[in-house]
Amino acid sequence: MHGIAKIYLDRHADATARVYLEKARLLAHTAGNLGLEAQILHTMAVLDAQAGDPDTAETGFRNALRITRSLDHHVGTAFILVDLGDLEIRRGRRHDGFLNLLEGCELAQIAGDRRTEAKARCALAAEYVKSGEMTLAAADYTVARTLYHALGDDAGAARAREGLAGLARAMP
């Protein structure tokens, strides 16, 4: 069900995806598969955030986070923390969001999850730019670019390069 939902999400059929996500969440919960339930809650939270429902998205992220922390699942926790941090920053809670991004980045490093680390580093770099910490921003964009390049993620590497180019233009 979760896989079917992701196919619909890829096709931007969000309403249909949500139906499958609800079914998948119920099945995972009934089966006691907490790890899968956390993944589904995370996917639903991302969908809620994209749909402009930040309150529901935050609740979903926090529920998924509670589960991954209880399972001591570093990869899942890191992944959720990065998305929660982004949401909190967009909601004007920069301090909380920044702390979640930092923790997510650290957990991703520990777990060897290079994709989540790269995503966290790009988000952290953007926050460093906002606070005038250009050296820290450049360091995080550089690491993110390297990670994305190693993963073969051209789009991610391009985002990091764009961040670095923006820094170069902003510097005297």
Image (cartoon, helix red, strand yellow):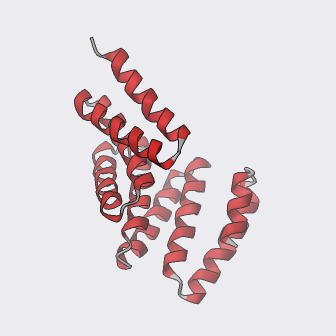
Q: Is residue 129 above or below residue 17?
A: above
Specify whether 113 is left or right of 137.
Answer: right
Residue at figure coordinates x 35%, y 59% from the top left: 108
Residue at figure coordinates x 40%, y 59% from the top left: 113
**Quadrant placement of the C terminus:** top left
Specify whether 98 is left or right of 49.
Answer: left
Q: Nearer the viewer, residue 22 or 118?
A: 118
**Quadrant placement of the N terminus:** bottom right
Seen as rendered, the residue at the extreme top is 172
Q: Position of residue 167 (x, y in %)?
A: 34, 23
- Quarter-of-image position of residue 114: bottom left
Residue at figure coordinates x 24%, y 35% from the top left: 136
Seen as rendered, the residue at the extreme bottom is 31
> Does residue 132 appear in the picture of this structure?
no
Q: Is residue 24 above or below residue 77?
A: below
Q: Nearer the viewer, residue 91 or 158?
A: 158
Residue at figure coordinates x 72%, y 59% from the top left: 7
Q: Position of residue 58 (x, y in %)?
A: 46, 58
> Does residue 6 appear in the picture of this structure?
yes
Q: How many numbered tags mark residues here?
A: 0
Q: Is residue 90 above or below residue 40?
A: above
Q: Position of residue 24 (x, y in %)?
A: 65, 75
Q: Position of residue 131 (x, y in %)?
A: 26, 31
Q: Nearer the viewer, residue 54 or 149?
A: 149
